[in-house]
Image (tube, helix red, strand yellow):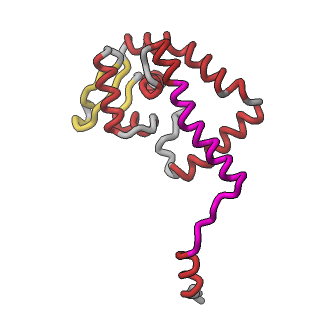
Amino acid sequence: MQVTPDPAYARSVSTSEPQWLTPEERSAWLTLSRLFETLPAALDAQLQRDAGLNYYQYVVLAMLSEQAEHALPMSRLSTITAGSLSRLSNVVKRLEGRGYVRRCADPADRRVSVVTLTDEGWSSLVAAAPAHVTHVRELVVDALSPTQLAALREAALLVLDRVDPEGHTAIPE
């Protein structure tokens, strides 16, 4: 037996008012929104001061450093760094100019560009990592108890599951 939805109900659902945020929900959302703006700026400032890199450049180098061959196709690097191909292309161009990465065509498929971390890029990342990790620890990790940190991770994963249900931006473990 197939149930036909009541047309009056369907109209009332599609034209109903939005479910406005409660004061508690609004406060949580605005706090998270402020964090989205201020945390990246704080990370950028530290990395710029100590290593001459911005946060996204650092993440690109870090993700490459974690690969067996220190290399990834541009498309995969774009997804795990949560940046558009256009943004990544501009960043890779700047990192190439500094000698930190090399971009070349994949021998198996010439249409695919592969980005490889150079020895100079590796050295720069190794030099930048201690201060960056210390800053991350000061700003986030040490501000939370282990239980709060686990809850933060769980909450972030729940939201990421909605924003990226296919898990394209999942960082390889």
Q: Position of residue 77 (x, y in %)?
A: 40, 34
Q: Nearer the viewer, residue 86 or 68?
A: 86
- Quadrant for residue 91, please give it: top left
- Residue beneath the point at 59% across and 67% down: 18
Outermost residue, left side: 110
How many numbered marks, from 0 up? Answer: 0
Outermost residue, front side: 23
Q: Is residue 152 left or right of residue 164?
A: right
The quadrant in which the C terminus is found is: top right
Q: Position of residue 15 (x, y in %)?
A: 53, 76
Q: Position of residue 25 (x, y in %)?
A: 68, 53
The quadrant in which the N terminus is found is: bottom right
- Quadrant for residue 133, please give it: top right
Q: Is residue 25 visible?
A: yes
Please report the bounds of the magenta region as a residue range. Answer: 16-43
| Majority secondary structure of magenta residues | helix
Vertical comparison of 136 with 98: above or below: below
Q: Position of residue 128 (x, y in %)?
A: 50, 14
Q: Nearer the viewer, residue 127 or 9?
A: 9
- Residue beneath the point at 49% across and 10% down: 127
Q: Is residue 124 left or right of residue 8?
A: left
- Quadrant for residue 8, please give it: bottom right
Q: Nearer the viewer, residue 154 or 139?
A: 139
Q: Is residue 68 visible?
A: no
- Residue beneath the point at 43% across and 19% down: 53
- Residue beneath the point at 26% across and 26% down: 104
Residue 32 highlighted magenta (yes or no): yes
Q: Is residue 145 left or right of residue 76?
A: right
Vertical comparison of 21 with 158: above or below: below
